[in-house]
Amino acid sequence: MQIAREVKNLLGYIIARAAAYRSYILPFLTVTLAKVSGAVFFFHSLELDTTDTYWMRAWGMTTSFPRWPFLFLGWDSGWYLDLALHGYHDPLTYAFFPGYPSIIYILNSGVRNVSVSAVLCSLVFGVAWIPFFQMVAEQYLPKPIALRCTLVMAFYPYLFVFTTVAYSESLFLFACTASWYFFLKNRIFYASILATVATFTRIVGVLIALPMLLDLVHRREWKHLSQSFIAPVAFLGWVGYCYVSGGNWLAFVNAQQYWELPANSWINHVTITNDAWEIFSLILIPIIIYHSRKVDWRLATYSLSYFFVVLLGSYTSIHRFLPFLFPLFITLFKWTNKPTLRFINQFTVVLCILFFSYALLLWNWFLLGKWIS
């Protein structure tokens, strides 16, 4: 009887806690189910149990086992696997920051399969960012609007795909959203540590520390100011490592030029390709950033610096990088949080279905070796 009573109390506690956090569980489980469903669909449609994928043949890994990780591997994934196994042995490898391959290396010491380690890392962080972003959004939006904002952002096609495949974006987004959440809660040390993780993940990662530093100076919280320098100092450490191991302070910039257009040539790129989305982005994104100052001037500062860096160095991948600028979605949904525009929120489900459908198309192209961004 005593054991039955204890079990009943435990179940009651679990149910009560689940009810308290159900608004966070819904998007988390929905997106997780969508990723798993997509993987199952492609496993059967590509007949992966008997047929080699494009990347298995391209990388000479047709005998690799297990085969399911190749549902998530392609393009830059190969560079990350190489870094996890061999480190920075080639000048081009410096284009990829060490955070993601380092975690792959740590996981691989236990898993003993670098492909599985890379995929697990990406998938875990690819959903771990969702509750943190939702909690951040709730600081600026009513909870129902924040929930819809989270779902729309999570299903945005390029963000959905690149937080599913074995790329560093999932770790980057997790670190940025979690860092900003802890900063809003005045947990400066945790925020700075997570900002450091973002710094070691992508070249724009250190920028999340900029609004933190400016805000602490603005509020004159000198006792916490030193903690906000952890990420910038870590970035300088990475620059120093590039010099010591590669003989070039800016090895990561020079290596990136192998894939990107020369600096300041994005205008010519737009003129030549006449890509409507790129032109539209150049017009729309600055407008959203301008209005984001009314939401939070700190997020506006972060967004402006992020957008500037993307324009200078990664314009050809603008479709891929800009969706990870999370304040854009918060600002957009701030606009919809008006009596005259609330009807737009009724289309959240339809919009997510359309986004998911296009994300599956991009995912399929990715697996077939087609460049998507």
Image (cartoon, rainbow, N blue to C red):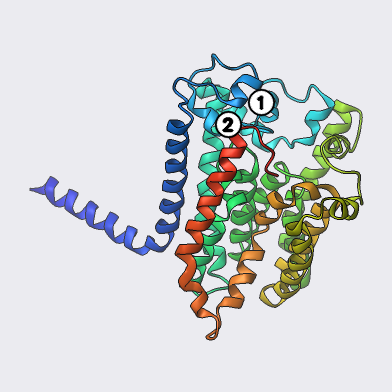
Left or right of 59 in this view: 69: left
Residue 13: percent from the left, percent from the top? 27, 57
Q: Residue at x 52, y 40 (%)?
A: 123
Q: Are marks 2 and 1 in contact (CB under 8 Å)?
A: yes
At x 75%, y 63%, the residue is 280
Q: Which residue is mark 1?
A: 84
x and y percent of residue 197 in the render? 67, 44
Secondary structure of the residue carrying numbered label 1: helix
Where is residue 285, by image quadrant? bottom right
**Viewer-side residue, 335 vs 216:** 335
Which of the labelled discs sits on residue 97, or is there none? none
Q: Nearer the viewer, residue 326 or 207?
A: 326
* Residue 365, x across and y down, in percent: 61, 39
Which residue is label 2 attached to? 118
Residue with the most extreme top position: 63
Work out whether 325 lies above or below 201: below
Q: Nearer the viewer, residue 269 or 100?
A: 269
- Indicate whether 64 appears above or below 240: above
Secondary structure under the numbered disc 2 in the rendered image = helix
Point out the tag, 2 or 1, that comes first from the N-terminus. 1
Amino acid marked by disc 2: Ala
Residue 103 position, x and y percent, is 61, 33
